[in-house]
Amino acid sequence: MSHPLRASVVGALHILGATVLAAQGAPTPWGAWAALGRTPDLQRYSPLTEITRANVKNLSVAFNFSTGVLGPHDGNPLVVNDVMYVHTPAPNRVYALDLARPGAPTRWTYAPADPPSGPGTTLGLAYHPSGKLFLALASGALVALDAKTGTVVWRIQPDSGPGALAPRTPFVVKDVVLLGAGGAGVRGRVSAYDVATGAERWRAYSTGPDSEVRLTPPAKALYPSMQGANLGASTWGAQSGAGGAATGWYAYDPQLDLVYYGSGRPAPANADVRPGDNKWSMTIWARHPDDGRVAWVYQTTPHDEWGYDGLNEMILVDILVSGEPVKALVHFDENGFAYTLDRRTGKVLLAEPYGQVTWASRIDLATGLPAVNPAFATSATQTTQGVCPAAIGLKTLAPAAYSPQTGWFYVPTVNACMDYHGPEAARDGPLVGGVVSMYPGLGGYRGRLIAWDATAGKVKWVVTEPLPLGGGALTTAGGLIFYGTLDGWLKALDQHSGAELWRFKTAAGIVGSPISYLGPDGRQYVAILSGVTPTGAVQDSNATLAAVATGGGPTNAGGILTVFALPAPPSPPPH
């Protein structure tokens, strides 16, 4: 077994948030990638078939583009018609690249004058069919841009309160744009703004009385521990409810007309000062987008002690579970359990570990609660050893992908455990969860890409990686799975077997997510953003990934867009 790496990280390990984006209501164009997950169900599946398992070995660079910004380039570009929209971390520039011209020259650039407050990491842009792009700035502002010209249509500055983190990525549903907020010492919330004017339509908090949570009849909570009035206030002891950031992924089912997302961990991180379940942190939500009312709610990790977050994506699929057709929601939580829920009601159908988990032995399907292992409860007076997964989670915000060809999910994970020492939590304030020493889990490697069967709760195959996986996955109708690594490799695997079929070394580490789109020339392309936090700057969860990986940064900071295609067919001979 390799020598265990131990990286001591003091403070919150997850201040990075992001929200999925989609142009909801109209069918997604076949060859476009107009939303972060391509479609509002967040399946990250491309129906394009030109690039296959047989010819992927012939992929080569079609063009590349330097963003001029160093740092973590999360998420992915958008492709609408013949334009690719590329975003950066702070200072949050946006570039419109003309795909109809050789080399994809820049049509326009948006460069906000706002001084960044923090790393300003964002998963990117949201697009609305009215021709607007939405961008959340590091200053906390939400901006609507004209997609044709890059000019500002409107701009608002949401009031999130002291201690709030900058919002990450907006999400478009019908005629509103959703934006989550959260941070240490503040209540997480989601707000809906009019796409035409920026006027606030509604806001809903993660904690507090039911009237502010918008949890009123006929909202459903199927499990007894989650039933009752004003649990968002009464389950915190004397501590006021804080945390529960809503800065993660959003998905939308247009048939049920429901938005799905997760809320983050409670604050302060010191669990001793907030007895109780701390609702509604660490919760999966289903809300009505027109007014924010809760349809149903399910808490995954009551009274979180380990620093996990519930912000990972909700993937919407229609599958068979125990032989019965189910409108399912599949969620790979940081706590190490993969949940398959009925997205109509919030009922948990399956919940199984998808990696090494020690803090709990199982999820009780009758109660919906985790069976917590008392040996791994945190303590304010001693070090708790061997907690798996580590506080960074078994999976970060890097999105999984689903393939209707196999019926499997392809999940980038982190293989890390931790020793947790608690006294610093009480001394240093709400953002601090103690001193965490993280090291590789079983096998000594730090990352895994797994194929997951959500109908049975089983891993189908595993590919191990020396470094944690901090970038997302892409599946295609050509039978391929694409993903990137922290040391800069973009790889293509066979969906059925996990066999590696192609790899390319990009200029920087990858925490972005690949996309595939149909160019104006009728050819299929694959694109990836490369860029990580510069060495030694532990500012966000991607920097923490780098620290877990090497004690610093594994590659250059970036950022580079690289676009791949098969060789162009020969031109027809002149007549």
Image (cartoon, rainbow, N blue to C red):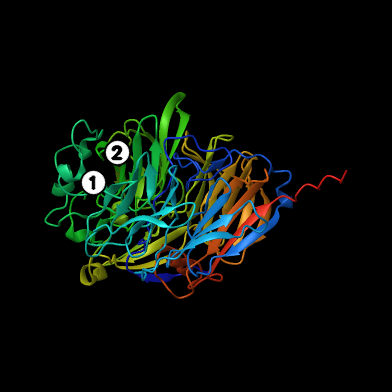
Residue 109 shown left or right of residue 366 in the figure: right
Residue at position x 49%, y 53% in the image: 413
Helix, strand, or loop for circle 2? strand
1 and 2 marks in contact (CB < 8 Å):
yes
Residue that numbered label 2 is attached to: 287
User: In this orientation, which residue lies closer to the viewer: 419 or 198?
Assistant: 198
Q: In which quarter of the image is residue 541?
A: bottom left
Binning the other alpha carbons within 10 Å of mark 1 as few (below 14), some (14 to 19) or many (20 upward) gives many
Disc 1 marks which amino acid? Answer: Ala
The residue type indicated by label 2 comes to: Arg
Asked whether, in this view, residue 126 is left or right of residue 569, the answer is left
Q: Which of 286 and 203 is in front in this view?
A: 203
Q: For this rendering, which residue is in front, 28 or 458? A: 28
Secondary element at image label 1: strand
Looking at the rendered image, the quarter that the C terminus falls into is top right
Up/down of 137 relative to 189, above or below: below
Q: Farthest residue in the bottom direction?
A: 536
Disc 1: which residue: 204
The answer to whether residue 340 shows anywhere in this view is no
Q: Can residue 530 be seen in this view?
A: yes
Up the image or down, 207 lies above or below 422; here it is above
Residue 217 drawn at (x, y percent): 18, 32
Residue 65 at x, y = what percent? 60, 63
501 horizontally vs 377: left or right = right
